[in-house]
Image (spheres, helix red, strand yellow):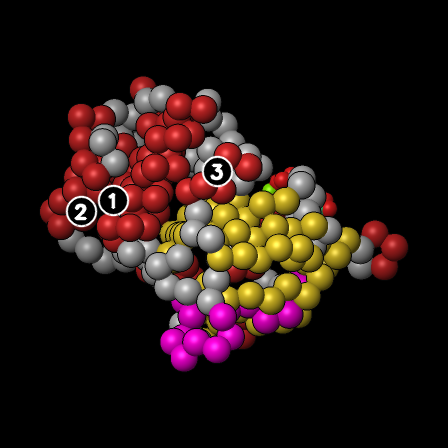
Amino acid sequence: MQGSGSSRTPALEVRDLSRIYGTGDIAVRALRGVSFHVASGDMVCIMGKSGSGKSTLLRQLGLLDAPSSGQVLLDGVDVTRLRESHRRVLRLEHLGYVFQEYALLPELTAEENVYLPSLMSGTPLRQARLQARELLAMLDLENRAGHRPSELSGGQQQRVAIARALINRPAVLFADEPTGNLDTESSERVMTALTRMNDELGVTVLFVSHDSDDQRFAKSLIVLRDGEIVSDVDR
Ligand SMILES: Nc1ncnc2c1ncn2[C@@H]1O[C@H](COP(=O)(O)OP(=O)(O)OP(=O)(O)O)[C@@H](O)[C@H]1O
Ligand SMILES: [Mg+2]
């Protein structure tokens, strides 16, 4: 996290963010006025009990949902106010996502899954394929490029998902419980892969985890309780 005295524009700034689901008697205040900065190149772990608002927070930051109030600034621009067409371009070209369930397309090979977002943003196939190969190699998957997801282990599928999330060289990568479905050893490999991508590509990473063990991979920590930050520390 970055102190308020810094002159550099943070990669991400969150101001008094709230998200209320539903209305009236059934309203759930999932986020209650959350504020923090994330410096470019940071690796942030978001922790907290089930229902504390972790996924809700990540969805607001990743432009997958719209907050009830407050602001999210990406490189100084309030993205909550942008038109949906502009938000879509930001999602495709500047943000990356990794989910607990990998969400790979089953009919496509690992390589095809990885380069699809690059094709969607207009890169020629040859170049997209080269980028995909390079990322798969960085993630120790070069000899799995032609495999379908069903022919890969959970940890391998998640590393393919990380490569896919990075193909358009996003500024920020969001990962919601990326190790939630994995055993200890695969979790370790996935977290190490994320750390390497943070170090070597300079991508800012925000990941959610249930497992306090995963904190050691982070440079900063945000702990949520009932939709509020209870701890926000640099490490
Ligand atoms: N679409 C929704 N409609 C209504 N309430 C919701 C919705 N999504 C989440 N909530 C509620 O908002 C609160 C925060 O949910 P959220 O999914 O952000 O928690 P979480 O910290 O990610 O939990 P977990 O660790 O179980 O994934 C919870 O009380 C949840 O029941
Ligand atoms: Mg969640």
Residue at mark 1: 115
Q: Residue at x 18, y 36 (%)?
A: 137
Marks 1 and 2: in contact by CB < 8 Å? yes
Q: Nearer the viewer, mark 2 or mark 1?
A: 2
Residue at mark 3: C-beta within 8 A of ligand 1: no
Disc number for residue 214: 3
Measuring from the top left, give residue 131's x and y in whole percent: 18, 47
Where is 217 relative to 226, above or below? above
Residue sitting nearer the eye, 104 or 96: 96
For badge 1, the amino acid type reads Tyr
Q: Secondary structure at mark 2?
A: helix
Q: Residue at x 85, y 59 (%)?
A: 24
Mark-to-mark CA distance, 3 and 2: 29 Å
Measuring from the top left, give residue 198's x and y in whole percent: 32, 50
Q: Residue at x 48, y 38 (%)?
A: 214
Q: Residue 231 falls in which quadrant of the image?
A: bottom right
Measuring from the top left, give residue 117's x and y in whole percent: 30, 49
Mark-to-mark CA distance, 2 and 1: 7 Å
Queried whether the magenta region covers residue 232, the answer comes back as no
Determine crowd level at label 1: few under 14, some 14-19, many 20+ residues with C-alpha closer than 10 A.
many
Determine crowd level at label 2: few under 14, some 14-19, many 20+ residues with C-alpha closer than 10 A.
many
Q: Residue 133 falls in which quadrant of the image?
A: top left
Q: Earlier in the sequence, mark 2 or mark 1?
A: 1
Which residues are drawn in magenta?
Answer: 3-19
Residue at mark 2: C-beta within 8 A of ligand 2: no
Q: Nearer the viewer, mark 3 or mark 2?
A: 3
Marks 1 and 3: in contact by CB < 8 Å? no
For badge 3, the amino acid type reads Asp
Task: State left or right for residue 111 relative to residue 183.
Answer: left
Residue at mark 2: 131
